[in-house]
Amino acid sequence: MSGLRPEQRARGGAWGVLVGDAIGAPWEFGPPNTAPRPTPAAGFLAHQQPSGTWTDDGAATLALADSIQSVGWSLEDQGARLLRWWKDGAYTAHGTCFDIGGTTRTALESIQQGSPAAEAGPRGDSTQANGALMRILPVLLCGIDLDDSELVRRGIEATQVTHGHPRVAVASAIYLLYARVLLDGGEAGEARELSVQRLNHVLRMQPDLLELIPSCLQVKRALGGAYVADSLVSAFTAVETTSSFRDCVEVAISYGNDTDTTAAIAGGLAGVRYGVEAIPSEWFDSLTAHRGFAEASRIINGI
Ligand SMILES: [Mg+2]
């Protein structure tokens, strides 16, 4: 899509996360290819919430965007806002946090007990899920003038507030550079290769991270799973095999399993690729009835 202004793409990315999350959520935990054609009227089969409700993916994305816009770059502030989401329902659709991943919960408990945010994310092998990848896009959307090195540095740091495993951080970095290719008007077909090339350059002096890049992309089939490499490859595949926002989100949901997060991660990229106006109006409108919509709009309009 040529002719889009950067802010159309950036706001499209943020709304794309929220809309993909809300439209994908009813089908969470389902097997592949069993969901009927997604529609807001499906409501929340998985969580018993009203239709158009965004979940942890959307709320944590709003928390990060609000932090960057409010105070600049502060991991302590990012952690504090995530804690407010979990404990007080900040950034949610209805004022309540009704779902949170296990690794994120462990990290936020550490922050609550006084751990520095930069060291809060667990690092064990079982903590390599998509809970940081799903919220990381505002690092780019609120920093489109950052050079690649700073974008990657911030992406890694923001990831570590909840997920300390280095592979999760590298996945975030690939995703941000991929989104940057799309933000700059590049083709989805070249974004995977270009983002890897650019990350190889940025991390050339950090072999411990550099060596993890291939493992983030070695998943052969899009399965919509919660493992960070599954999520990343599923989202990229949904973007690369479709040519509209709607088709991208529907394909992401069709993979089954962690449908809300796959659709959120893919929807963010599709929003950047096609711009905010390309989001189907009936999907977008399903979000507007919720009391958190005004706050979401304030944050995203500030991008
Ligand atoms: Mg979710």
Image (cartoon, rainbow, N blue to C red):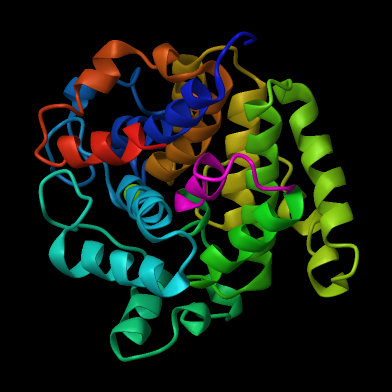
Where residue 79 sits in the image (x, y, percent)?
37, 71
Looking at the figure, which quarter contains the N terminus?
Answer: top right
The quadrant where residue 117 appears: bottom left
Q: Position of residue 233 (x, y in %)?
A: 65, 42
Q: Which residues are magenta?
A: 135-147
Residue 115 vertical position relative to residue 301 in the rendered view, above or below: below
* Image point (25%, 13%), residue name: 282
- Residue 76 lies in the magenta-colored region: no
Q: Nearer the viewer, residue 264 or 250?
A: 264
Q: Quadrant of the C terminus?
A: top left
137 vs 152, left or right, is left
Q: Tell me if residue 250 comes above or below residue 217 in the rendering.
A: above
Q: Position of residue 87 (x, y in %)?
A: 18, 70
| Front residue of this view, candidates 266 and 224 | 266
Residue 292 visible at all: yes
Where residue 171 sits, quadrant-wise, is: bottom right
Name the image quarter holding residue 149: bottom right
- Position of 167 compared to 103: left or right? right
Q: Is residue 186 left or right of residue 268?
A: right
